[in-house]
Amino acid sequence: MPNTCVRAAAEGLPAINRRKALAFLTGGIAAAAVTLPAVVANGAPAASTVQDVLSACHAAENRLGTCETREASIAEALGDALFPEWKTPGGVASRWSHVPMTFRTSKALEAEIERRRELIEKSFGGGLMNRPAYERWMGDIEAQGKEGLAWLREREAVIDASGYHDASDQTDEAFTEARAAFQAVMELRCETIEEVRAKAACIIRVYKRLGVTIDGDDLVACMSSLCEED
C-alpha cells in the first residue's frame, strides 16, 4: 500500500499567508497617504501618543519575528514529516476508489471509514450485497483503515511532540497583534514633519518585511503635500 509524504508548496505555509494578509488588511500604502491626512493642524494627538503608537508597532513586529523564527525552525527540523499523506489502494478492486484517495489527517480518514461502513451496511441491507461480499468489503475497509490510521497518528504524534502547533498558535496571536498595531500606525494623524517622517519610516520598515520596496523620500513628500493642502 503506497504511503507517500509530499512537502506542501511554499505558498501554503502559514507565515507566507500571514504576510499576505497583513499587506492586504492594512489597506496598502495609499491608506497612509490618502485615506487620512498625514498632518492636521487641529485635534492631533500629542507627540508622545504618536511615539507610543510607533513604539507599540515596533514591539509587535519584533514579537512576530521571534515567533515566526521559532515556527520556521521547528518546521525545517520536521521537514517532510510536517506534511504526512496516506493513500488508499486504487484500481478496479479497491474498496475505496479506482483512483487512490489521499488523507492528510487521521480525523479525515476516520470520517471516510465511517462513511464507507454506512455505504456497505446500506448495500447489504438493501439486498445488493450477499453475506460473503459484505464480510470481504467490511474486512478490507477495517484492515486498511486501521493501517492508515496508525500511520497517520504516528506522524501526528511526532508533529505534536515537536511543539509545532504551539509555535504556530503563538505566531497567529503575534500576527493579530502586529496587524492591529500597524493599522493604528496607518491611521495616525501627525502634527509635525518629524512625526510624518517617523510614521513613514515605520511603514517602510513593515513593508520591507513583506518584501515590498518603498521610496522613503517619495512617501514623505506625498504625505507632507497633504499637510500643505490642509
Image (cartoon, rainbow, N blue to C red):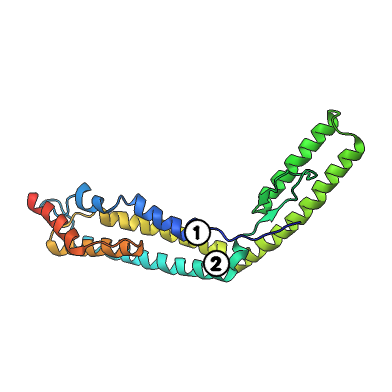
Could you say where residue 219 lies in the image, as x and y percent from the top left?
Answer: 19, 59
Which structural element holds mark 2? helix
10 Å crowding of disc 1: few (<14), some (14-19), many (20+): few
Q: Distance between the residues labelled 2 and 1?
A: 10 Å
Specify the quadrant of the image occupied by residue 220. bottom left
Specify the quadrant of the image occupied by residue 46. bottom left
Q: Please, what is the three-letter code of the amino acid marked with disc 1? A: Leu
The residue under label 2 is 75
Could you say where residue 223 lies in the image, as x and y percent from the top left?
Answer: 16, 55
The residue that appears at 84% across and 30% down in the rendered structure is 128
The residue that appears at 56% across and 64% down in the rendered structure is 164
Q: How many marks?
A: 2
The residue that appears at 26% across and 63% down in the rendered structure is 204
Could you say where residue 118 lies in the image, as x and y percent from the top left?
Answer: 77, 37
Residues at marks 2 and 1 touching, judged by CB atoms closer than 8 Å: yes
The residue under label 1 is 13
Which structural element holds mark 1? loop
> Which residue lies most toward the top here?
126
